[in-house]
Image (cartoon, rainbow, N blue to C red):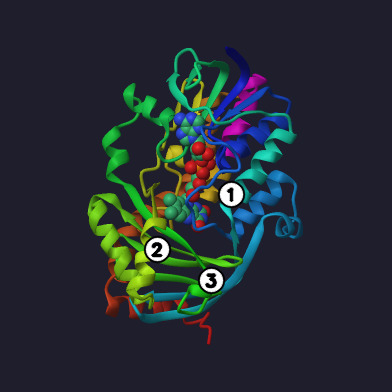
Amino acid sequence: MNYESDVAIVGAGPAGSTAAYVLAKLGLNVIIIDKSSFPREKLCGGLLSSKSVRLLEKIFDETEESLNKKIINFSSNIFQVMFKEKTLAKYYSKTPTYFVERTVYDNFLLDKAISSGATFIQNETVKKVDLDSNALFTSKGNKIISKYIVGADGANSIVRKEFENNGIICKDIWRNSLGITLEISIDKKKLPIEKNIICLYFGYIKNGYAWIFPNMDKSIIGIGGLLKDINNDNINDMFIDFLISLGFDKKTIDSFIKKIRGHPIPFGNYIEKPIYKKTILIGDAAGFVNPITGEGIYYAHKSAEIAANAILKDYINQGKLEEDYINNLNLFLLPELFNSKKSRNLYFKIFNNYYLAKIASFYMFKNTKYY
Ligand SMILES: Cc1cc2nc3c(=O)[nH]c(=O)nc-3n(C[C@H](O)[C@H](O)[C@H](O)COP(=O)(O)OP(=O)(O)OC[C@H]3O[C@@H](n4cnc5c(N)ncnc54)[C@H](O)[C@@H]3O)c2cc1C
């Protein structure tokens, strides 16, 4: 079967659903396709920074109050920064940090896109992309032809791989700065330490960190760092060391093993020109994740908003797609990623050395100390 649309979006995560919502609301004919059936799970800490919530309010016409009712499970202003078992700082942030459950969050965003008129095709994988004829070929033998393609298909993006195959971007740069993560979600009651604050742990992994993020009735425990520094075996060992140091006994850890999940994360491999002809990459597919914190949801929404505006202008002949997308990425998104990447090595070097981390924490958090 052949489908036709103005815009075909691959991936219904935060990036894809945001682009679909904005474009469908403006009257474009939008198809959004995902390989999963929704609601679906996505490995994530579920942390939403304040700037993400402000952006959600703006794009989706919501208020903090309405988001609290619909998707936000938990919020906290207190951070604890640790070097292994030792506390470096406990501080109070003026703005709260929010937590969501990704299954609910992504489904909420997708519902918004569908209600604004986008057509959703689920449980169907895009297998091949023709960047010259703007055609997508799916696992069910369908073909989608569109004026624009948006690759919002995450860290393992097939649309980005098509850019690599065509020599538009370099494979090695992507691999060189790819991150790897492990995560487990556990019942909050089982956590042997304080439960309702945001804990960041250094000293377990070279260019990365471990975390415990609170949520409504569970805690998300994870670890992540640059893939080139580790291999699959020793990240498992690092994670087990971390769990032991949290006070879990061997029997409990053994019962966790099967529930631990891993996923790649872009970690400094953002693409500065993620566009070819009428195909645009957004979100994780373009590597838009902060290279220090691993925050990606904000950049997924922001790049989707920028891409949707560039597509609209091109569609009504009031702008040039590539120029608009790249200029606005350079104005509103890439500088943050660039600055974080520049300071990343130094930052992780300091925080993975107890004495340097102690001195740095003293100066960084002295005015926001929490007792
Ligand atoms: C362990 C971990 C913890 C994280 N924690 C946080 C956090 O706390 N806060 C934060 O801000 N960020 C976090 N991130 C990053 C965040 O998850 C991503 O940046 C964010 O999900 C990016 O959204 P996206 O829409 O670009 O991609 P995704 O959310 O990955 O969505 C991509 C979608 O594309 C679909 N898809 C993929 N391939 C195809 C295909 N071929 N055909 C059709 N559909 C396809 C997938 O099914 C998926 O639904 C974390 C990442 C990891 C790995």
For label 3, the residue is 188
Instruction: Pick whichever, 54 or 14, lies toward us.
Output: 14
Give the structural element (helix, strand or loop) at label 3.
Answer: helix
Residue 364 in the image: above or below residue 42: below
Residue that sits furthest to the bottom in the current view: 371
Give me the C-alpha separation between circle 1 and circle 3. Answer: 18 Å
In percent of the image, x 45 and y 78: which residue is there? 192
Q: Position of residue 268 (x, y in %)?
A: 36, 48
Q: Which mark is residue 103?
A: 1
Give the structural element (helix, strand or loop) at label 2.
Answer: helix
Q: Tell us which disc is closer to us: 2 or 3.
A: 2
Give me the C-alpha separation between circle 2 and circle 3. Answer: 14 Å
In percent of the image, x 75 and y 46: which residue is there? 61
Instruction: Pick whichever, 238 or 249, lies toward us.
Output: 249
Circles 1 and 2 in contact, beta carbons < 8 Å: no
For label 2, the residue is 256
For marks 1 and 2 on the same chain, the one whose residue lies earlier in the sequence: 1
Circles 2 and 3 in contact, beta carbons < 8 Å: no
Q: Quadrant of residue 69?
A: bottom right
Residue 75 is inside the magenta segment = no
Q: Quadrant of residue 245?
A: bottom left
Q: Is mark 3 within 8 Å of ligand 1?
A: no
Q: Which residues are magenta?
A: 304-318
Q: Position of residue 356 (x, y in %)?
A: 29, 76
Amino acid on which the number 2 mark rests in the picture: Phe
Residue 287 in the image: above or below residue 85: above
Give the structural element (helix, strand or loop) at label 1.
Answer: helix
For marks 1 and 3 on the same chain, the one whose residue lies earlier in the sequence: 1
In percent of the image, x 35 and y 25: which residue is there? 168
Amino acid on which the number 1 mark rests in the picture: Thr
Specify whether 53 is left or right of 244: right
Q: Position of residue 136 (x, y in %)?
A: 49, 19
